[in-house]
Image (spheres, rainbow, N blue to C red):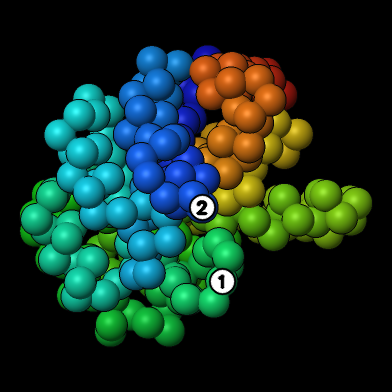
């Protein structure tokens, strides 16, 4: 059986709830430790320029207390590079960032921003931090990631999810085909393929079936679902959904 994708749990929005009122509760580090106990394979946290959710102290505590790999999502800025080099997380995922956006909107333009990104990829890699680029499922972005020397790309699944919930079956199918094609191309070009953004119990299956996808990063939905069923239950159910979909894909002979 093809190995199921790893599940990285993003804890940003535990911090969003904490910061809505101030104080220390709910604690995102406690959520990360609970996620580890529930079977998460890694923890993702996005340290934004405006510190709207995760803060510097959270990153320091995560590095001290976590036994799972930490994936630090970060903009390609000198401030964030300095923080990453100081803490040296297992991985750093370079993402686009706009102050006015509620959440990350779309993928990084690795092709258009090649010259700007090159130094960040190089310096992070030199520090033995695994670099990934959060990109659209587009051949030009895949080739730019290869040119930059980033070993990993994370394919943006947000548009696929939006089309599913809009009821646009044809559009969602076309976007899923884009994800499959980009994953296949990236795999052939030697990249490790991850995917994420907006995935839910109802939408994760087709993405988990893509054989090149080695990791799925999911956060907002799991934190939201935890309000109703608890964090352990939401993570356990997501792991089960991923594993079942991957097994079904293998039985169906999902195209490589």
The residue shown at (28%, 84%) is 115
Residue 87, position in %: x, y? 13, 50
The residue under the point 15% across, 34% down is 64
Q: Quadrant of the C terminus?
A: top right
Determine crowd level at label 2: few under 14, some 14-19, many 20+ residues with C-alpha closer than 10 A: few
Q: Name the residue under label 2.
A: 20
Q: What element carries label 2?
A: helix
* Residue 201 in view here: yes
Q: Is residue 204 above or below residue 179?
A: above
Whether residue 239 is visible, yes or no, is no
- Is 34 situated above or below 57? above
Residue 230 occupies which quadrant of the picture? top right
Q: First in sequence, mark 1 or 2: give its number.
A: 2
Q: Quick check: marks 1 and 2 in contact, CB under 8 Å?
A: no
- The residue sitting at 45% across, 45% down in the picture is 18
Q: Distance between the residues labelled 1 and 2?
A: 17 Å
Residue 145 location in percent, x, y? 36, 66
Please give the count of numbered marks on the rendered protein.
2
Q: Relative to residue 240, is residue 115 drawn left or right?
A: left
Q: Which mark is residue 154?
A: none
Residue 227 location, x and y as percent? Answer: 63, 29
Pick the residue in front: 227 or 138: 227
In the visual, does 244 lie left or right of 77? right
Q: Where is residue 97 in the image (x, y as percent from the top left)?
A: 44, 72
Mark 1 or 2: the one toward you = 2
- In this orientation, which residue lies closer to the viewer: 143 or 97? 97
Q: Look at 52% across and 45% down and name the residue there.
A: 17
Q: Residues within 10 Å of mark 1 (few under 14, many from 20)?
A: few
* Residue 200, quarter of the rendered image: top right
Residue wearing tag 1: 101
- Height in image: 22 above or below 144? above
């Amino acid at each position: 059986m093809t190995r199921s994708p790893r599940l990285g749990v993003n804890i940003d929005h535990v911090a969003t709830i904490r910061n809505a009122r101030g104080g220390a509760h709910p604690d995102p580090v406690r959520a990360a430790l609970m996620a580890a106990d529930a079977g998460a394979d890694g923890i993702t946290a996005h340290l934004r320029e405006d510190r709207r959710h995760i803060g510097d102290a959270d990153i320091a505590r995560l590095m001290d207390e976590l036994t799972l790999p930490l994936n630090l999502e970060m903009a390609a800025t000198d401030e964030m590079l300095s923080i990453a080099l100081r803490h040296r997380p297992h991985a750093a995922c370079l993402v686009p960032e706009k102050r006015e956006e509620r959440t990350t909107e779309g993928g990084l333009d690795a092709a258009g921003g090649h010259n700007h990104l090159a130094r960040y990829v190089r310096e992070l890699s030199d520090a033995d931090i695994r670099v990934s680029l959060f990109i659209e499922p587009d051949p030009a972005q895949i080739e730019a990631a290869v040119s930059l020397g980033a070993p990993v790309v994370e394919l943006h699944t947000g548009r696929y999810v939006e089309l599913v919930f809009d009821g646009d079956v044809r559009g969602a199918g076309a976007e899923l085909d884009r994800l499959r094609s980009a994953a296949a191309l990236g795999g052939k070009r030697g990249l490790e393929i991850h995917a994420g953004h907006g995935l839910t119990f109802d939408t994760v299956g087709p993405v988990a079936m893509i054989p090149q996808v080695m990791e799925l990063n999911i956060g907002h939905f799991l934190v939201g679902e935890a309000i109703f069923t608890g964090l352990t239950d939401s993570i356990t159910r997501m792991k089960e959904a991923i594993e079942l979909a991957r097994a079904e894909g293998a039985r169906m002979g999902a195209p490589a």
